[in-house]
Image: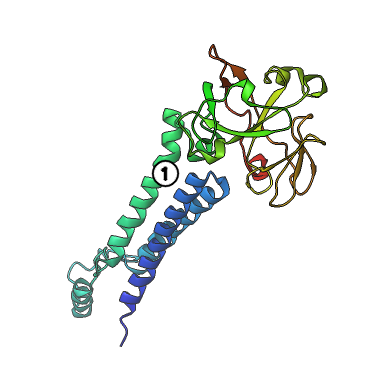
């Protein structure tokens, strides 16, 4: 025969288990930068705690009400028997098995640890992983190198060609890959502040397509457009890599360029906006 008390204990443990899993969900939301997932995780976590503690209070703790009879001072036999029966009843405030207690400790510990993540970011101004994903390896003064690791000079970028470059020492940084093309500076239709990001008609754009993150692999010299061979997105080089064809809806971010004392092309900072697919621009 099933013990009703043990069944209640298992349901309480299950509620605390839900809280533990919800804490993992909240942690994933923090790592992914998904505020909705983070909030949902905390909501389910505290809801699980509330349900478990409420069931514990209603089903395992003494319920009462308790009335203390003052008269008569000498209890009749029936009252004494009732008192003896009451004293012999198992009204311990905690469950007999250790399962609910252990699951409560696990759920509270998991939620407490996950709650430290956003608190850490608030108190110490530590960026969340989402911010790290929004930045690349380019910094002010970082030299541009080719796929062979050699520094790229302005003279290496010939009209009609396209050259892929990386930050020096970071050939493994796929999100930092950029393409260099040389055009007639008089034909560039860029904002005044971004015209200063070019060097003798050399302009640099992110190599990561803003549609699905595929690498930009083609330069159409006649039309002076960059193209992604994966899904046929096309970007106008002269107008800030605006998308003019295909599924991409966001321009390729432009990398500010300069030249160092040795004539090597260098970055004047990181891309002004995240590289890659357009979901970064969610509001």
Left or right: 32 in relation to 24: right
Q: Is residue 132 left or right of residue 246?
A: left
Q: Residue 53's spot in the image, x, y percent? A: 38, 60
Give how far across and how far down residue 237 sits, in percent.
76, 32
Left or right of 11, for residue 138 = right
The scheme the figure's colours follow is: rainbow
Q: Quadrant of the C terminus?
A: top right
- Picture coordinates of residue 225, whole percent (x, y): 77, 37
Evaluate whether residue 139 shows in this view.
Answer: no
User: What residue did someone put label 1 on?
Assistant: 115
Q: Which secondary structure, mark 1?
A: helix
Residue at x 55% of width, y 46% of height: 34
Instruction: Locate residue 77: give its quadrant.
Output: bottom left
Q: Residue furthest top?
A: 261
- Pick the front one: 212 or 42: 212
Q: Please, is residue 206 above or below residue 189 in the view?
A: below
Residue at horizontal 19 percent and vertical 79 percent from the top: 81
| Residue toward you, 245 or 283 | 245
Q: Residue at x 56, y 39 (%)?
A: 175
Q: Is residue 151 left or right of residue 251?
A: left
Is residue 251 at all visible to an observer of this figure? yes
In front: 201, or 268? Answer: 201
Q: Position of residue 273 (x, y in %)?
A: 63, 32
- Given residues 106 and 191, the one toward you in this image is 191
Q: How many marks?
A: 1
Crowding around mark 1 (Cα neighbors within 10 Å: few <14, some 14 to 19, many 20+) is some
Name the quarter where the N terminus is drawn.
bottom left
């Amino acid at each position: 025969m099933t013990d009703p008390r043990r069944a209640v204990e298992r349901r309480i443990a299950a509620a605390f288990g839900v809280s533990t899993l919800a804490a993992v969900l909240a942690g994933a939301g923090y790592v992914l930068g998904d505020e909705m997932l983070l909030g949902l995780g905390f909501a389910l976590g505290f809801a699980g705690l509330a349900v478990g503690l409420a069931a514990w209070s209603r089903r395992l703790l003494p319920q009462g009400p308790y009335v203390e009879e003052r008269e008569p001072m000498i209890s009749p036999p029936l009252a004494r028997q009732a008192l003896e029966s009451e004293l012999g009843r198992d009204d311990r405030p905690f469950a007999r098995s250790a399962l609910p207690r252990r699951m409560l400790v696990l759920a509270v510990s998991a939620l407490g640890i996950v709650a430290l993540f956003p608190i850490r970011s608030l108190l110490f101004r530590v960026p969340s992983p989402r911010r790290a994903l929004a930045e690349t390896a380019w910094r002010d003064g970082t030299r541009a190198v080719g796929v062979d690791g050699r520094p790229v000079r302005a003279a290496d970028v010939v009209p009609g060609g396209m050259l892929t470059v990386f930050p020096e020492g970071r050939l493994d940084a796929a999100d930092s890959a950029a393409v260099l093309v040389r055009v007639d500076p008089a034909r560039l239709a860029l904002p005044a502040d971004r015209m200063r990001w070019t060097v003798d008609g050399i302009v640099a754009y992110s190599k990561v397509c803003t549609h699905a993150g595929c690498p930009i692999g083609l330069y159409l010299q006649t039309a002076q457009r960059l193209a992604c061979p994966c899904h046929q997105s096309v970007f106008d080089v002269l107008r800030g890599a605006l998308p003019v064809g295909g599924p991409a809806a966001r321009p390729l971010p432009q990398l500010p360029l300069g030249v160092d004392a040795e004539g090597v092309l260098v970055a004047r900072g990181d891309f002004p906006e995240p590289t890659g697919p357009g979901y970064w621009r969610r509001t």
